[in-house]
Image: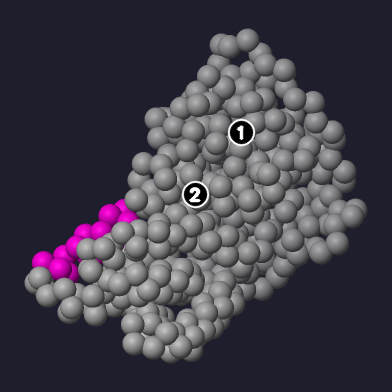
Amino acid sequence: MPPLVALYVRELRLSVRIGGGALMGVLFYLIVVTTFPFAIGPDLNLLSRLGPAILWIGALLATLLGLDRLFEADRDDGALDLMVASGQSLELLVIVKVLAHWTATGLPLVVAAPFLSLLLAMPVDVTIATVATLLVGTPALTFLGAIGAGLTVSLRRGGLLLPILVLPFAVPVLIFGVAAATAVAYDPAAFRTPFLLIVAVTLTAAAISPIATAAALRNGLD
Amino acid sequence: MLYWGSMPAPEMPVSQPFQPFRLVVEALGVDRGGRRVIEGVDLTISAGDAVLVTGPNGVGKSTLLRALAGLGRPVNGSVRFEADGVGDPDEVGRHVHYLGHRDAVKPALTVRENLAFWQDFLGGEGGAPVEAALEVVGLLDLADLPAAYLSAGQRRRLAVARLVAVRRPLWLLDEPTAALDAASEMNLVRLMTDHIERGGAVVAATHLAIGLAGTRSLRLVAGETA
């Protein structure tokens, strides 16, 4: 197996085995989203209007949940040392790890979203729009989160610091995501602009994050 | 031939000799936690060398080995790997094995998966197959067991199997015998001897006297190198 493929496969294996985070994110997502109808009450109009926002907030929180372990586990057992010393490009390693992490934790959220939208009485077109925005928007959250994970890797119990660092940068994704999904209910043409802006944020994050994360990791390796 | 404990000796995978190489360390200075730990280390390690790094706790043995492996940035000086066909002299990491205090073993993966990953990741050309490497360290029977169930010594042996499964000319071993029992220690020494005979080199930081013939000693003293 080529090195980067081997890394991808290993990351996926680890996330579905005991102690991995793959199922945790979806369960947390389920819990957060199902709590909203209880809090808001049986007002279906209100629920369906808030639906995209609820799904997006849930996805944002669920994504942040497992990110602190992205590099910490490898640092604790010395694997990160070997990876950095291996002579492979650290930036490429970060991309592979982020993609594997998204496949294991982000993609399940996207798949779960249509089912959760039933609980929120969301119309079909808004559901489709929300799932589309989640599909292109959650990779941005993982890429941004990787920077935070790289910065906090050398800290013990850096778990809470990571969301504080990452959340401000994740807000644009949230705004455009909810804007695009909500727009569909009133004017399908208004979906395009915010949707393209999320794509732009994702691409920017994918370009900047590997470089920033690799720099943070090198700095934290002492 | 090598074997572990009282088991019948497994066939050591035959491996090609290494081509000549040199690791050249010039005026190396490394900081750790804002304090100068390594200062002015000059060292040349060539094929067939065994260098024992000794010194009291906290003198910088681990820091020196990490710097040789390309981990952590030297404040001054340089570490170069020179050999025929090596284009970029700075890519030290591609030519060395770094066996640190931590074993880089994932508890959730099986013994075989752990080793197979590192072989794929670090490049398995010329190294022993996974099964053969596990047999050398006496872990073949446990190959399908999750590594979470291994003892500290067995985890260490799994890390040692990496040296066999991935072919690298220079081994940097930091306290390699930690957690190993007497028989395992003997076998590690035999692995090292075999590696040196094939034209490899070993730099080991250890408190134990590893009986390798022709061993050079590098004694680190606080504040200077002797």
B21, B106: nearer the viewer = B106
As helix, strand or loop, the secondary structure at mark 2 comes to helix
Say left or right for A177 vs B192.
left
Does the magenta segment cover residue A28? Answer: yes
Quadrant location of residue B195?
top right
Gap in angstroms between the C-alphas marked 1 and 2: 24 Å
Query: Which residue is label 2 attached to?
Result: A12
Q: Residue at x 50, y 26 (%)?
A: B144
Horizontal and vertical percent for residue A21?
Answer: 37, 52
Which amino acid, mark 1?
Ala
In the displayed structure, would residue B164 be above or below residue B138? below
B200, A4: nearer the viewer = A4
Q: Residue at x 37, y 74 (%)?
A: A125
The span shown in magenta is A24-38
Horizontal and vertical percent for residue B53?
Answer: 62, 47
Single out the mark in the foreground, 1 or 2.
Answer: 2
Q: Can residue A165 be seen from the camera position used here?
A: no
Query: Which residue is label 1 attached to?
Result: B161
Neighbourhood count class around disc 2 (C-alpha, 10 Å): few under 14, some 14–19, many 20 upward: many
Say left or right for B29 vs A186.
right
Q: Residue at the right extreme?
A: B84
As helix, strand or loop, the secondary structure at mark 1 comes to helix
Visual colour scheme: one colour
